[in-house]
Image (tube, grey):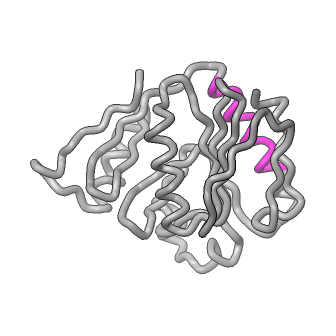
Amino acid sequence: MEALTVDIKSVIELTDEQFFQLCQANKDLRFERTATGELVIMPPVGGESSNRNGRLNQQLFNWADADGTGIAFDSSGGFKLPNGADRSPDASWVKLERWDALTPQQQTRFLPLCPDFVVELLSPSDSLKATQEKMKEYRDNGVRLGWLINRKTKQVEIYRIGQEVEVLDNPSILLGEDVLPGFVLNLAAIW
């Protein structure tokens, strides 16, 4: 089952607070909101995808804890992008200075910024085209490095500001480049 997109804007335009409360009142559902106000309801993923996403986050969190230059987030973290969309990448990271610049209240809500780094792990219920569009949206809103991992084809699409998408076939590792210096994602636990 793919994500369901509902055009509610013709009936009601949710404020940021109303959208936040909708998410809080329906914790068993995962919502995103597009820049045009459409509500995206994402189905839960299966066990295999959940395990692989956990392994991905485990590696990112372990690196972030050891490195100390930023904060890592899992798929339950929401971000209010500059274009107005509310997104929840499968894994993400924000530089510590940007996190520290937020007020305590902002830190408890959907973060009003675009992460520096995002990962989307394509699950069987995800549309490749829609996920590629989401990755472009992240890049257009300030993500410095983004990875779209397609387990089915064993390909990784790398998104960087001002550059064409780079596609890697069956890599064994991914490097965090200058955004996450020293981070190495071992894809053996993901494939």
Q: Quadrant of the C terminus?
A: top right
Q: Is residue 181 above or below residue 23?
A: below
Image side of residue 58 versus residue 21, left or right: right
Determine which quarter of the picture holds residue 151: top right
Report the magenta residues as a range: 49-62
On the question of residue 91 being in view, the answer is: no
Q: Given the current orientation, which residue lies at the most extreme front position?
A: 164
Q: Residue at 36%, 64% (x, y): give it.
A: 84
Determine which quarter of the picture holds residue 181: bottom right
Q: Residue at 68%, 78% (x, y): give it.
A: 97
Q: Is residue 36 above or below residue 24?
A: below
Magenta-span inclusion, residue 181:
no
Q: Quadrant of the N terminus?
A: top left
Q: Residue at 61%, 59% (x, y): give it.
A: 164
On the question of residue 174 being in view, the answer is: yes
Determine which quarter of the picture holds residue 148: top right
Viewer-closest of 24 and 48: 48
What kind of secondary structure does the magenta stretch mostly adopt? Answer: helix
